Image (cartoon, rainbow, N blue to C red):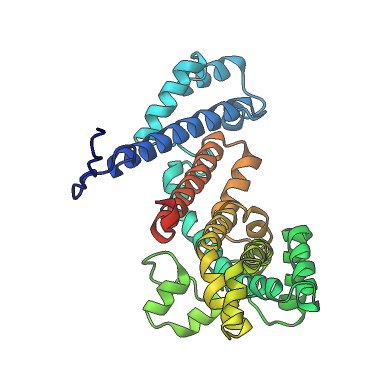
Amino acid sequence: MAEAAVPARRTGGVAAPGLPSWSGTALRVVVSIAVTLFGLMALTFFIGRMLPLDPVTAILGDNATQEAIDAMRAQLGLDQPLWIQFGRYVGDILRLDLGTALTTGKPVLDDIARVFPATIELATVGIVIGTALGIPLGVMAAAYRDTPVDYFVRVFGLLGYSTPNFWLGLMGLVLFYATLGWVGGPGRIDTAFQWDVEPVTDLLLLDTAMAGQWEIFRNVLSHIILPASILAFGALAYISRMTRSFMLEQLSQEYVVAARVKGLSWMRTVWVHAFRNVAVQVVTVVALAYAFLLEGAVLTETVFAWPGFGRYLTNALLAGDMNAVVGCTLLIGIIFVALNLLTDLLYRLFDPRTR
């Protein structure tokens, strides 16, 4: 006689066989991040060595003697084999030493810490505008597919993808600043106010609001609103397009028909039921759009003389400052890795299917 099957006991707090434990998942995440960052360091190092920019020439000039060039190459360690240079480069990064910027004579990390808050403020205002407009437009385009609303959103998104930021910035300055006088000009703040702000976070909107300096706050807002709107235009196009795509997939599901049969209004079905199922995907899109704004504000910051990360990187490229260029490139990669990790954690937190 066959023996009766004995049901498996469930032990509290012990992962079932075959299922990954949290410690194993965390280990894989740590290893993945370490490998990614090591690959990023290798990529930035070798790209820096392949670029046709000679740091020795940038320091000494084109008329330096060969003896001076050789001495400077030895001082910078450029006469060593590449694998030794790379090992020294990795060791410096692990000590948070990105070298000294040739353009400023200061450590690259200090320069980045000085200019990055301006870019964070600009990109944050831009992503707030892009998200506040992009998500509703994408949802409405999907809810009213193949109607004038949908066509408008799609054409608007196409313009956001195809219109160059620098051209929009120049036209915006001509129209809204030089002609109408509705916004402030280039820079973060008028010269008359720049010494009146006590830097706490180096985010001028936040610092002036915390200090109750509302006149200066309005001045800072008048300067940031135009470049942030230019950045938001591209983010809005991306967010609205992806939101529309996600929503179209959900609105074709059977639960939407069931909700309508039960008597729910179309807008309640769209926003309460369908949008809730794409919220995590939309958060991922917003996070990636924010990363693109942080690293893609180069032309916008140049047009508006915005003293941020993008303008610093542009000046470093033009001056052949390889320490600054490689340091900025490495930071951009770390930002993308961090935001991708954040979106993955949000997926696991809000979507039980990923757990």
Q: Residue at x 39, y 58 (%)?
A: 349
Q: Nearer the viewer, residue 303 or 121?
A: 121
Q: Nearer the viewer, residue 169 or 340?
A: 340
Q: Residue furthest front?
A: 1
Q: Residue at x 50, y 75 (%)?
A: 193
- Image quadrant holding the N terminus, namely top left
From where the camera sits, is residue 291 visible? yes
Q: Position of residue 322 (x, y in %)?
A: 56, 34
Q: Is residue 247 left or right of residue 78?
A: right
Q: Residue at x 45, y 31 (%)?
A: 38
Q: Position of residue 42 (x, y in %)?
A: 51, 28
> Which quadrant of the view contains residue 200?
bottom left
Q: Position of residue 277 (x, y in %)?
A: 52, 66
From where the camera sits, is residue 188 visible? no
**138 over 289 or under it: above or below:** below
> Which quadrant of the view contains residue 231?
bottom right
Q: Position of residue 128 (x, y in %)?
A: 55, 70
Q: Residue at x 78, y 63 (%)?
A: 158
> Which quadrant of the view contains residue 37?
top left
How many badges with numbers are in the image? 0
Q: Nearer the viewer, residue 12 or 324?
A: 12
Q: Nearer the viewer, residue 67 or 320?
A: 320
